[in-house]
């Protein structure tokens, strides 16, 4: 997949637990995780099941403590088509303790959308 070839892509981070990202990099990683099933074809039910299975580990690659708070949702305009990808994927992730530049830790929510 194209996205696996870019820096910070899921393939580069798989199994690498030694990486430490600052708050902004973690936020970007959450947004990036919305593309976890990019390029995968199937009906909406299949894609929904796939993103539900893969998202928790995808968002945790960008920092410890991240969990899905809402969603994920895989949307297709034509949900029964099996030869197309999801039109959109979105979710909200939460981390109760992200350390920001000021050195303080804050509860943080990120809204992530993979659009068309």
Image (cartoon, rainbow, N blue to C red):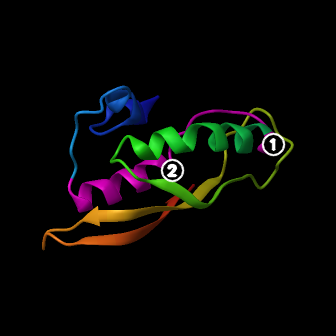
Query: Where residue 31 sits in the image (x, y, percent)?
Result: 42, 56
Q: Is residue 47 left or right of residue 37?
A: right
Residue 37 visible (yes or no): no
Residue drawn 22% across the image and 38% down it: 19
Q: Is residue 100 left or right of residue 107?
A: left
Q: Is residue 52 left or right of residue 92?
A: right
Query: Where residue 52 sits in the image (x, y, percent)?
Result: 66, 44
Q: Which residue is mark 1?
A: 45
Compared with 17, 26 (above or below) is below
Residue drawn 62% across the image and 33% down it: 40
Residue drawn 77% across the image and 37% down it: 46
Looking at the image, is mark 2 or mark 1 earlier in the sequence?
A: 2
Residue 29 inside the magenta-drawn segment: yes
Q: Residues within 10 Å of mark 1 (few under 14, many from 20)?
A: some
Q: Which residues are magenta?
A: 22-45
Query: Where residue 110 sits in the image (x, y, percent)?
Result: 44, 66
Q: Is residue 94 left or right of residue 105?
A: right
């Amino acid at each position: 997949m194209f996205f696996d070839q870019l820096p910070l892509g899921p393939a580069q981070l798989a199994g690498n637990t030694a990486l430490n990202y600052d708050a902004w990099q973690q936020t970007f990683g959450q947004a990036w995780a919305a593309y976890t099933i990019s390029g995968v074809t199937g009906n909406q039910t299949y894609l929904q099941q796939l993103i539900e299975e893969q998202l928790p580990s995808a968002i945790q690659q960008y920092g410890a403590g991240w969990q899905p708070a809402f969603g994920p949702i895989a949307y297709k305009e034509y949900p029964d088509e099996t030869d197309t990808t999801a039109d959109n994927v979105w979710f909200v992730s939460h981390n109760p303790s992200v350390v920001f530049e000021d050195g303080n830790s804050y509860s943080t929510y990120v809204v992530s959308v993979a659009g068309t």
